[in-house]
Image (cartoon, rainbow, N blue to C red):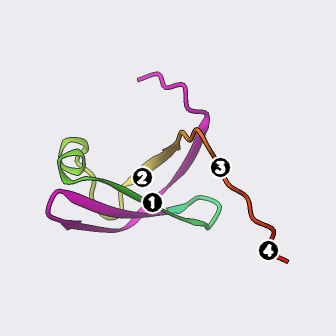
Amino acid sequence: MALSARNRLQGTVQSLETDGIMADIEIETNGGQTVTAVITSDSVDRLGIDEGDEVNAVIKATEVMVENAD
């Protein structure tokens, strides 16, 4: 499937928690960072996502905020 989003982070599903209609997925990227995604439980089922699976976190944002950490 072709997507316009260019920010793709490859990684492994470290944890998957479903609660009703929503699911939290923690993905450890190949670079060692952790990304958390919140998607519907139906999407988890449709995509067949399980802990340990190799996935891509595809990020498409219209806005990114940056704060000075100093």
How far apart are the two marked residues, 1 and 3, measured between alpha carbons?
24 Å
Tag count: 4
**Percent of width and height locating residue 68:** 81, 68
Judging depth in this view, the residue of 64 and 7 nearest the camera is: 64
Horizontal side, residue 43 vs residue 5: left or right: left
Where is the N terminus found, in terms of image quarters? top left
Horizontal side, residue 52 vs residue 69: left or right: left
How far apart are the two marked residues, 2 and 4, measured between alpha carbons?
32 Å
Q: Give the magenta-colored segment's residue range.
A: 1-27
Q: Residues within 10 Å of mark 2 (few under 14, many from 20)?
A: some
Residue drawn at (19%, 41%), measured in percent from left and top?
46
| Furthest-bottom residue in this view | 70
Which comes before the other along the chain, label 1 or label 3? 1
In the rendered structure, find residue 64 and report the number of the disc placed on it: 3
Horizontal side, residue 5 vs residue 20: left or right: right
Q: Is residue 45 above or below residue 35?
A: above
Which residue corresponds to mark 1? 12
Circle 1 or circle 3, nearest the eye: 3
Which residue corresponds to mark 2? 54
Which residue corresponds to mark 4? 69
Q: Residues within 10 Å of mark 1 (few under 14, many from 20)?
A: many
**Percent of width and height locating residue 37:** 41, 57
Which comes before the other along the chain, label 1 or label 4? 1
Q: Amino acid at mark 4?
A: Ala
